[in-house]
Image (cartoon, rainbow, N blue to C red):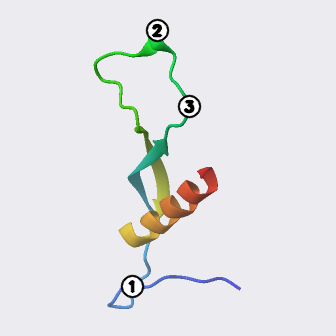
Amino acid sequence: MLKFLLDKRGRLLKDEWYAVKLIYEFLITGEPDPAKIDQDYNTDKQYEENIIIVKANSFEHAFSIAEMRAKEKE
């Protein structure tokens, strides 16, 4: 069964490309390698930023796709 999404006026929504930024926060445990510590070292957390491109029919749809991909990476 084919499903089509319509806008508020009943027009067919077309897929477009969206860029979505994902930011992951990691809690650090254990002792660091002293040779790798610099002035920007944070003892508690580290962050990873990813920008993904998704094809979706709305911002909300793109956001939900990004949430699913983020949960897969957890």
At a point 28% along the width and 18% down the height, the residue shown is: 39
Callout 2 secondary element: helix
At a point 49% along the width and 82% down the height, the residue shown is: 5
Disc on the earlier residue, 2 or 3 = 3
How many other residues sit within 10 Å of disc 3, few (<14), some (14-19) or many (≥20)?
few
Disc on the earlier residue, 1 or 3 = 1
How many other residues sit within 10 Å of disc 2, few (<14), some (14-19) or many (≥20)?
few
Residue contact between numbered discs 2 and 3, judged by CB atoms under 8 Å:
no
At a point 49% along the width and 55% down the height, the residue shown is: 54
Q: Nearer the viewer, mark 1 or mark 3?
A: 3
Residue situated in front as seen by the camera: 54 or 21 = 21
Above or below: residue 31 compared with residue 68: above
Between marks 2 and 3, how big is the CA–CA gap?
15 Å
Q: Quadrant of the N terminus?
A: bottom right
Give the image location of residue 8, x and y in percent.
33, 89
Judge from the rendering whether residue 5 lies leftward or rightward of residue 69; answer left or right: left
Residue situated in front as seen by the camera: 47 or 69 = 47
Q: Which mark is residue 30?
A: 3
Callout 3 secondary element: loop
Amino acid type at mark 1: Arg
Residue situated in front as seen by the camera: 37 or 30 = 30
Callout 1 secondary element: loop
Residue under label 2, please give it.
Answer: 35
Residue under label 1, please give it.
Answer: 11
Between marks 1 and 2, how big is the CA–CA gap?
60 Å
Q: Nearer the viewer, mark 2 or mark 3?
A: 3
Judge from the rendering whether residue 55 lies leftward or rightward of residue 21; answer left or right: right
Tell how many labels. Answer: 3
